Every structure is written in C-alpha cells, then in structure tokens.
Image (cartoon, helix red, strand yellow):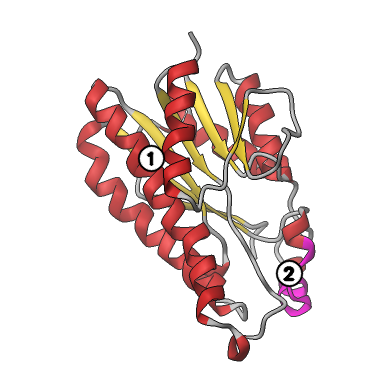
Amino acid sequence: MPNVAVITGSNGLIGQATCRKLMQSGFLAVGVDIGAESKGNWPYYQCDLNDLGKLDQTFAAIEKEHGLIRVLYNNAGVFHPEKDWLDVLPEQFDATMSANVRVPFFAAQWVAKRLIAAGQGGSIITTASMAGVNGSTVVEYGASKAAVINMTKSLGKRLGQHNIRVNAIAPGLIKTAMGARVPEVSKQRALGSALGRAGEPEEIASVVDFLASDAASFVTCTTIEVNGGS
C-alpha cells in the first residue's frame, strides 16, 4: 500500500499542486481543508483545523480509512495584509497565531505520536515564509512564520531519534491568491530577485515531494528558501 500523506490547505493552489505531485510519486495524498468540497481528485476531509477536537477526529478518520500517516504537510495558514500593525486587535493576532503556529504544532504532535507508537519513521513539513526570515510589514504574520522556522528546528531535534524528519519551506512570492495580496513594496522586492519572477505553485510542490521522499533521508531541522534568489 502507498504511504499516506496528509496535505492541509489542500484547496489552495500550492495544496492542489502538492497533492498532484505526491500522487504522481506514489503517495496516497489526502487533502484537508475548510471548504465544503475538494478541488481535486483525491480523498478529502473538510475540517476547521483551529478546532483541535475536530483536527483529532479528522486525523483519526484518515488513519482508520487509509492507514498510518507517514507524511504531514502543514500547508494551511492565514495572511491579513489589509490590517496595519497599529490597528491589529488581540483576537486578530490570536487567529493568525492559531492557524499558522498552533495548528501545525498539534497536527505534528498527533502524527508523531502515532509514528512513534508504530515504530515508523516519517516526514513532517510546514509552510513557513520569507516573511519569517526577513521580517514583514504584516508583523503578526512574519512573527508567526518565524515561530514555524524555530519550531521546525526544535521538533526536528526532538524527533530525530525516532527517524521522523521535520523541515519547512520558506516560499518567496508565489502565484497564488495569497501572493496576489502581498503588499506592493514586498511584491516589487520579490520581483527583483535573481530570477526576476514570481514562483509557480508546482515549484513549491516539487520541494515538498523531495522532503517527503527517501531522497531527503538526511535532511531535517532545515528550512529551504524557495524564493528565486530574493
């Protein structure tokens, strides 16, 4: 049976591209998103992951129906550039931190516990951002993605003894709905990269595919910058 790979945020363009790529590589890609219906031809589960009780139920249903989750791609996240930092309210800050940090933390915990109990290795991958590397005018978003980068290093050190690899991807400007909402100053900076263009969702999916595969068997605690040289 193929290894099960769960992709959160599977209805976004990066999520869709990743599901397709992993299926091509022989994984059973399982999508999870908040939308009522899947935007692709793979097993799909609707879930608001911010509700950790529903996250637990959804992941348990996936495991029961498809088997042990060997790969987790924490791709779901939120980005609210329309709010100036001076106007961000505590509940808006909390919502960003919940989606971008709390959910990946507990999703990884859920998967890692089962892998350890089964004596199996695996791969946990999370979407960070160059905003977490360089900072951002969308301050709470940049802070959340910086937390993802540190969490990746910390979880990788904790789980290495169990042959569970933990890595992150820091995309630059990518042609997605979220990318279209990037502030203009940041967009122009990204377009001034070495390659001089925005990235395609498939270019992120290819890196996820690598990190999920045995080709990355000695790669952990790492954040790969996929930004065209910006």
Estimate how packed mark 2 is, as few (under 14), some (14 to 19) or many (20 or more) residues with alpha carbons within 10 Å.
some
Magenta stretch encompasses residue 185: yes
Estimate how packed mark 1 is, as few (under 14), some (14 to 19) or many (20 or more) residues with alpha carbons within 10 Å.
some
Magenta-colored segment: predominant secondary structure: helix
Residue 182: image tag: 2
Quadrant of the image occupied by residue 151: bottom left
Residue 144: image tag: none
Which residue is at a point 37% across and 48% down the rendered structure image?
106
The reply to whether residue 134 is in sight is: no
Amino acid type assigned to the residue bearing label 2 in the image: Val
Residue range of the region highlighted in magenta in the rendering? 180-189
Of the 4 image quadrants, the one containing the C terminus is: bottom right
Which residue is at a point 70% across and 36% down the rendered structure image?
17
Percent x, y of residue 31: 61, 32
- For this view, does 123 lie left or right of residue 190? left
Seen from the viewer's position, the closer of residues 229 and 19 is 19
- For this view, does 95 lie left or right of residue 183? left
Tell me: residue 203, above or below residue 80.
above
The reply to whether residue 105 is in sight is: yes
Tell me: residue 53, above or below residue 135.
above
Amino acid type assigned to the residue bearing label 1 in the image: Val
The residue wearing badge 1 is: 219
Which residue is at a point 64% across and 30% down the rendered structure image?
19
- For this view, does 177 lie left or right of residue 117? right
Disc 2 is placed on an element classified as: loop
Disc 1 is placed on an element classified as: loop
